[in-house]
Image: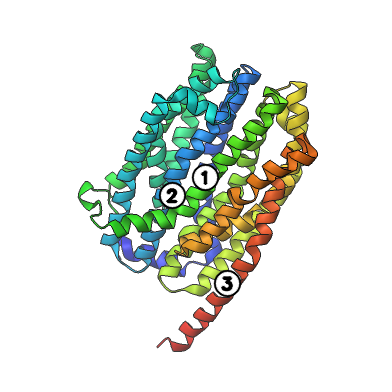
């Protein structure tokens, strides 16, 4: 049995719960490590000063922009690749991989160059105050230097997952993440580089992690291959990648825009408020990484089986994923709410930071439990190529509701309005997604029944 045949049998015959968990475990580990090392930057930098802690929140918006392009190209290519492999069209799948990989390098290079040329206005645009600006520039410089590696890593990571070999993605991401956590204290405190040391540690780990992610493609461990000669000459293929990946672009891009707006709104309450919301965002990211890992284990299962016309498996996979993710978050968010002050104090012990951060974290934990409804719904539609519905849910999840909340609620409730904006948006997006997903699941059931009826 060839590698391609073995993969087809595994993806279409293994019980969906077992298959999703098998694919999700390495993804969860890699996401946890990635989120932990992002949180480690905040942790170590927060020991320098409140302004330095605020800088991590500013640069988080920059990283969200880079990830927006990376996930757009990675999910856009990965969804097509998985469906093409399900339909046994390997050569065309390699075209999508090569095109997205080289586009990622180009996009990362352009953002890095433009960002470095206009560094100061860029940091101010992202919400930096005058006191935070020097720290944001020091940190952001190295993130911009690492931009090509960060965008390309997103592509390789997602394609490995969509091929059903998430363990290789886990190795690449965790290696870079662990290295980052080791280098952070060495560069920040050992070498006395301060905030710039955190940025340098991230840049070094990103390039090493990207190289490790590239190895499976170079060593023939994947069905698809990276080759400059496979870069598409058909503009429709590029359009397909962009449109399929646009929900990811919207999720990450709008998230970055929302964080920037949050920083601008929080600036009215001082650097302590910016630092507090930065810490809360990282904590929520760490909590959600568990549920998101389950969702990312679900994506290749839904895409591959949709391509193979096994619609009943797609439906079962979605239901298992969304209930599992919400159950995990219910437990984690409950624990985090109980110990909110202690969690914030791990980063900063300033009274103002703890007061704002703990209250915001409690509210965020309540809303976070409902986030899988919209997030996994968007993943479902994206993985099977339903671009319009995927983009609509991504819009609602990331900014379509959150951004208006940020503009409206503080007008009536002040700082409490800022703390309420994100969890209120999570709940509203989840409710919005329910009828769209249920309608589609019903159509899948009918299509599967018709396939069974006419199957020879």
As helix, strand or loop, the secondary structure at mark 3 comes to helix
As helix, strand or loop, the secondary structure at mark 1 comes to helix
Q: Quadrant of residue 124?
A: top right
Q: Residues within 10 Å of mark 3 (few under 14, many from 20)?
A: some
How is this picture coloured? rainbow
Spot occupied by residue 344 in the image (x, y as percentages of width and height):
71, 30
Q: Quadrant of residue 86?
A: bottom left
Nearer the camera: disc 2 or disc 3: 2
Spot occupied by residue 103 in the image (x, y as percentages of width and height):
32, 45
Residue 416 seen from this side: yes
- Height in image: 255 above or below 175? below
Depth check: 101 or 136 in front? 136
Q: Residues within 10 Å of mark 1 (few under 14, many from 20)?
A: many
Q: Mark 2 vs mark 3: which is more N-terminal?
A: 2
> In this rendering, would 259 be left or right of 352?
left
Spot occupied by residue 267 in the image (x, y as percentages of width and height):
67, 27
- Which residue is the site of mark 1? 252
- Which residue is the site of mark 2? 72
Q: Residue at x 45, y 38 (%)?
A: 66
Question: Mark 2 touching mark 3, by CB under 8 A?
Answer: no
Q: Residue at x 62, y 23 (%)?
A: 53
Q: Residue at x 49, y 35 (%)?
A: 63
Depth check: 152 or 223 in front? 152
> In this rendering, would 449 be left or right of 335?
left
As helix, strand or loop, the secondary structure at mark 2 comes to helix
Q: Mark 2 vs mark 1: which is more N-terminal?
A: 2
Question: Mark 2 touching mark 1, by CB under 8 A?
Answer: yes
- Which residue is the site of mark 3? 441
């Amino acid at each position: 049995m060839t590698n391609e045949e073995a993969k087809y049998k595994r993806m279409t015959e293994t019980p969906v719960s077992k298959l999703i968990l098998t694919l999700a475990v390495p993804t969860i580990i890699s996401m946890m490590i990635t989120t932990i090392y992002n949180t480690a930057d905040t942790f170590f930098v927060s020991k320098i000063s409140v302004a330095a802690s605020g800088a991590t929140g500013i640069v988080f918006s920059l990283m969200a922009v880079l990830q927006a392009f990376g996930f757009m190209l990675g999910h856009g290519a990965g969804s097509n690749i998985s469906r093409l492999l399900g339909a046994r069209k390997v050569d065309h799948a390699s075209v999508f991989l090569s095109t997205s990989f080289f586009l990622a390098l180009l996009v990362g290079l352009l953002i890095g160059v433009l960002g470095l040329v206009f560094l100061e206005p860029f940091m101010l645009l992202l919400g930096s105050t005058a006191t935070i600006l020097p720290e944001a520039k020091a940190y952001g410089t190295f993130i911009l230097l690492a931009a090509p590696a960060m965008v390309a890593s997103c592509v390789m990571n997602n394609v490995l997952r969509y091929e059903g070999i998430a363990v290789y993605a886990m190795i690449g991401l965790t290696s870079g993440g662990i290295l980052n956590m080791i280098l952070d204290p060495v560069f920040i405190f050992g070498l006395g580089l301060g905030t710039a040391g955190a940025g340098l540690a991230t840049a070094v780990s990103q390039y090493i992690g990207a190289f490790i992610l590239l190895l499976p493609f170079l060593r023939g461990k994947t069905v698809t291959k990276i080759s400059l000669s496979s870069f598409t000459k058909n503009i429709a293929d590029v359009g397909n990648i962009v449109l399929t990946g646009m929900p990811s672009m919207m999720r990450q891009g709008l998230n970055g825009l929302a964080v920037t707006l949050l920083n601008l709104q929080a600036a009215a309450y001082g650097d302590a408020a910016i630092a507090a919301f930065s810490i809360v965002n990282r904590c929520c990211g760490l909590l959600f990484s568990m549920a998101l890992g389950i969702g990312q284990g679900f994506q290749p299962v839904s895409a591959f089986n949709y391509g193979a016309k096994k619609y009943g498996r797609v439906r079962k996979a979605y239901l298992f994923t969304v209930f599992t993710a919400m159950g995990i978050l219910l437990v984690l968010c409950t624990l985090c709410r109980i110990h909110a002050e202690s969690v914030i104090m791990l980063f900063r012990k300033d009274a103002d930071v703890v007061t704002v951060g703990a209250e915001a974290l409690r509210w965020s934990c309540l809303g976070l439990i409902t986030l899988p409804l919209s997030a996994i719904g968007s993943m479902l539609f994206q993985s099977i190529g339903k671009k319009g519905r995927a983009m609509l849910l991504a819009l609602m999840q990331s900014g379509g509701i959150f951004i208006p909340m940020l503009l409206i609620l503080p007008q009536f409730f002040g700082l409490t309005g800022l703390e309420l904006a994100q969890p209120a948006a999570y709940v509203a997006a989840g409710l919005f997604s329910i009828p769209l997903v249920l309608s589609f699941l019903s159509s899948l059931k009918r299509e599967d029944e018709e396939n069974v009826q006419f199957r020879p």
